[in-house]
Image: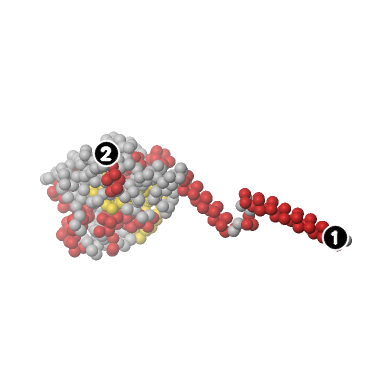
């Protein structure tokens, strides 16, 4: 009896050993659930799905914009300094009626919500290299070395009640900016109500709100009614604050005065901070762009421009808007830039965001700019750009100086 029990136990032990060996063999080849930390399993799963998102889906705002491994696993190369698909001279007309829906159909599939784009196959550059498009260019390595490919461009548009202009601008600019291989987003900063307009304050607000979404390195400030006629005019920043709209059809493609800095300008985050942004106190039309120019000079910088072939623009014809009359007090304020630069600007900006709407073509931010009563008399007037320069502009028309050209 004892022997039988003993035999049975031996058999049982051998059988158990065999089972254990088989079990170990299989557990090597398969991740058996109860041998794996359940948390680890969940994490692995998440990681995998994120990786899939990174390589196949379009990244969200807060995802890293730096070089991401391509589907092949290799990191993306920087985009070429000179984008390969530029068309150079463009045909632009504003007679055609364009609805936002038309534009959405045309360029929407290439964009992400908020009017965002980044090239799929290379890492965009936000900075122009010196000497770009010059005949004798520096070597490729120098040019690549000088560019910082890491960050994006925020395009800031001051806005109120110019919806037809908005459709034209989006229709022309999105394809241009895509051809320029920029990593960019479009912010339309809409002044709420019918108080006196404040273009400069809207620019400061656009800069501040954009930076809440992403660490932009370059800011292009553009009027809604200016469309470039040459896509070699890159919407990137430069080692100097850059004036892009140098040759506007309205002025026979010449600079109305030498220090003009209105229309379309590009400043790096560092340059814009250095001048404390725009003044917030230029209510009504005129002067804020000249004040910015003076801030730049006061902080020891100078500006750069494309030449007058690359820097050509077409402006949509319009009359003076309601509640944006020329403000004669702004001329006087231009004498005060050195005193006001440190206390009036980004560091004193005060406003309320009413609504942020993400359209496929742009981010639309409606703001209360806290229009002050009693900012001074606002008289009627006409012309373009600064009120100071309005006097000068009828007398002198300038060509871009070679010193500014790059
Ligand atoms: N703007 C606007 N609504 C207004 C007034 C101005 O959207 O009621 C914006 C728009 O982007 C415009 C810019 O502010 O292009 C500059 O104003 P405006 O076009 O009157 O200036 P100018 O043509 O004289 O440079
Ligand atoms: Mn205009």
Report the residue that reaches farthest toward the front.
3
Query: In terms of depth relative to the viewer, which is nearer, 207 or 133?
Result: 133
What residue is rendered at 22% in x and 53% in y?
Answer: 289
State the image quarter where residue 16 is shown: bottom right
Number of marks in picture:
2
For disc 1, the neighbor class at 10 Å (few under 14, some 14 to 19, many from 20) is few
Task: Return the residue at label 1.
Answer: 3
Residue 254 coordinates in the image, percent (x, y): 17, 42
Residue 19 coordinates in the image, percent (x, y): 72, 53
Task: Return the residue at label 2.
Answer: 230
What residue is rendered at 52% in x and 50% in y?
Answer: 48
What residue is rendered at 18% in x and 39% in y?
Answer: 252
Residue 238 coordinates in the image, percent (x, y): 26, 49
CA separation in Å, label 2 and label 1: 101 Å
Dot in front, 2 or 1? 1
Residue 381 visible in the picture: no
Indicate left or right for 47 with 117 as reference. Answer: right
For disc 2, the neighbor class at 10 Å (few under 14, some 14 to 19, many from 20) is many
Helix, strand or loop status at disc 2: loop
Helix, strand or loop status at disc 1: helix
Mark before the other along the chain sequence, 2 or 1: 1
């Amino acid at each position: 009896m004892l022997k039988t029990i003993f035999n049975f136990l031996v058999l049982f032990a051998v059988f158990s050993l065999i089972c254990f060996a088989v079990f170990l063999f299989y557990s090597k080849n398969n991740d058996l659930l109860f041998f794996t930390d359940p948390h680890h399993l969940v994490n692995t799963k998440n990681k995998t799905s994120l990786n899939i998102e990174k390589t196949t889906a379009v990244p969200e705002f807060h995802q890293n914009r730096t070089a991401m491994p391509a589907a092949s696993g290799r990191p993306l190369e920087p985009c070429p300094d000179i984008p390969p698909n530029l068309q150079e001279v463009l045909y632009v007309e504003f007679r055609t009626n364009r609805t936002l829906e038309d534009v959405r159909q045309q360029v929407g599939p290439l964009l992400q919500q908020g009017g965002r784009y980044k090239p799929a196959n290379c890492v965009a550059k936000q900075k122009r290299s010196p000497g770009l498009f010059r005949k004798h260019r520096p070597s490729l390595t120098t040019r690549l070395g000088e560019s910082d490919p890491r960050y994006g461009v925020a395009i800031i548009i001051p806005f109120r009640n110019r919806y037809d202009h908005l459709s034209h601008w989006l229709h022309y600019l999105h394809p241009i900016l895509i051809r320029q291989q920029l990593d960019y987003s479009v912010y339309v900063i809409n002044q709420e109500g019918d108080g006196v307009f404040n273009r400069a304050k809207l620019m400061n607000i656009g800069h501040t709100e954009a930076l809440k979404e992403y660490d932009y390195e370059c800011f292009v400030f553009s009027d809604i009614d200016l469309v470039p006629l040459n896509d070699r005019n890159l919407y990137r920043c430069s080692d100097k604050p850059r004036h892009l709209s140098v040759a506007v059809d309205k002025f026979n493609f010449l600079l109305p005065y030498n220090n003009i800095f209105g229309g379309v300008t590009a400043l790096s985050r560092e340059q814009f901070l250095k001048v404390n942004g725009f003044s917030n106190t230029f209510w009504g039309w005129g002067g804020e762009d000249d004040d910015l120019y003076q801030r730049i000079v006061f902080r020891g910088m100078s500006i750069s421009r494309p030449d007058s072939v690359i820097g050509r623009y077409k402006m949509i014809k319009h009359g003076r808007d309601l509640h944006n009359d020329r403000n004669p007090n702004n001329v006087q304020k231009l004498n005060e830039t050195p005193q006001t630069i440190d206390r009036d600007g980004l560091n004193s900006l005060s406003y309320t965001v009413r609504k942020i709407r993400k359209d496929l073509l742009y981010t639309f931010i409606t703001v209360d700019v806290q229009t002050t009563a009693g900012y001074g008399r606002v008289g009627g007037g006409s012309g373009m750009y600064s009120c100071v320069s309005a006097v000068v502009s009828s007398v002198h028309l300038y060509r871009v100086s070679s010193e500014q050209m790059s």
